[in-house]
Amino acid sequence: MNKVSLKTGHFLSVTDVTPAELQALIVYAVELKAKGWTNLLKNKILAIMFEKPSLRTRVSFEVGMKQLGGQAIYLSPAEVGLGQRESVRDVSLVLSRFVNGIACRTFAQQNVIELAKYGSIPVINALSDAEHPCQALADLLTIYEHKGQFKGLTMAYIGDGFNVANSLVIACGMTGMNFTIASPDGYTLQPDYVKTAKKYAKASGAKITLVTDPREAAQKADILYTDAWYSMGQEAEAKIRRKAFAGYQINEKLLSYARKDAIIMHDLPAHHGEEIAEGILYAPQSVAFDQAENRLHAQKAVLAGLLG
Ligand code: CP
């Protein structure tokens, strides 16, 4: 097994890896998944510093470090007060004296950028307002396991053009997978993410398309992907968003537009009856729980590459 070195020394964005490194991380994750427990990160410690709740990300980082022979320390928002009790710069300088890496879930991408800028250890974005690169990596691993390829496939992303979609559109552009997002007016991807994805797509041959009609996106899609209509921190907007996204649900009807062998993806947690119809998450086409498991294997590839 050859660990994959990441060009920037951090994983704050999917753009921190080259398309070749992204593909290599998937191959490495497959190998690590088959191998299980190793000693690749013996005597290494990861600080897991979260400003928001988490099930999958926290558990997969903790278990991942243990399976790699290392350890993890969880730091809650109350303990750290990132940028409030103490400046991000000082937190980064202090943690650099104690641990070998930081996985940070934060409300602001600027925080992970500053952690990486001022500290001397690798920083991993465990979800910010801009991106969820670890999720995108696990999603690619899941697609690879179920479809055996990326090039030529079409992902239809139904919903909010926010952090998860930002990382996915770039990942699709890098791997040659077509990406069509269907969002209501005012909720599509930000232009800079589209521009970045299209830059990669030019080399890979992927098509990046923005539409408003979910049926148009789902037409002949290989993958139907959705995420919650409102993210952590957007709960106050829930009523407005439920109204805006009504009609953007993955259900049997929408699935009928996709290819017969299409898979359904959701990064979880799900709001059953909102972005995904009741019961669909447990349908044979759903790979949502494979995605959840693959957080572990994909992140182990990143951890070994950055901390090893
Ligand atoms: N998908 C995801 O990031 O899940 P958690 O919020 O539970 O970590």
Image: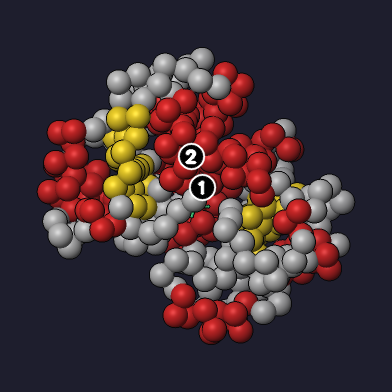
Badge 2 local density, few (<14 within 10 Å), some, or many (20+)? many
Identify the image's colour scheme: rainbow, by chain, secondary structure or one colour.
Answer: secondary structure
Numbered circle sitting on residue 60 = 2
The residue labelled by disc 1 is: 56
Residue 163 in the figure: left or right of residue 252:
left
User: Label 1 CB, ligand 1: below 8 Å?
Assistant: yes
Judged from the image, the secondary structure of the residue bearing numbered disc 1 is: helix
Judged from the image, the secondary structure of the residue bearing numbered disc 2 is: helix
Quadrant the C terminus occupies: top left
Badge 1 local density, few (<14 within 10 Å), some, or many (20+)? some
Relative height, residue 209 to residue 289 (above, below): below
| Coordinates of residue 86 in the picture (x, y in percent) | 14, 56
| Coordinates of residue 268 in the picture (x, y in percent) | 58, 56
| Coordinates of residue 211 in the picture (x, y in percent) | 65, 70
Toward the viewer: 118 or 174?
A: 118
Mark 1 belongs to which amino acid? Answer: Arg
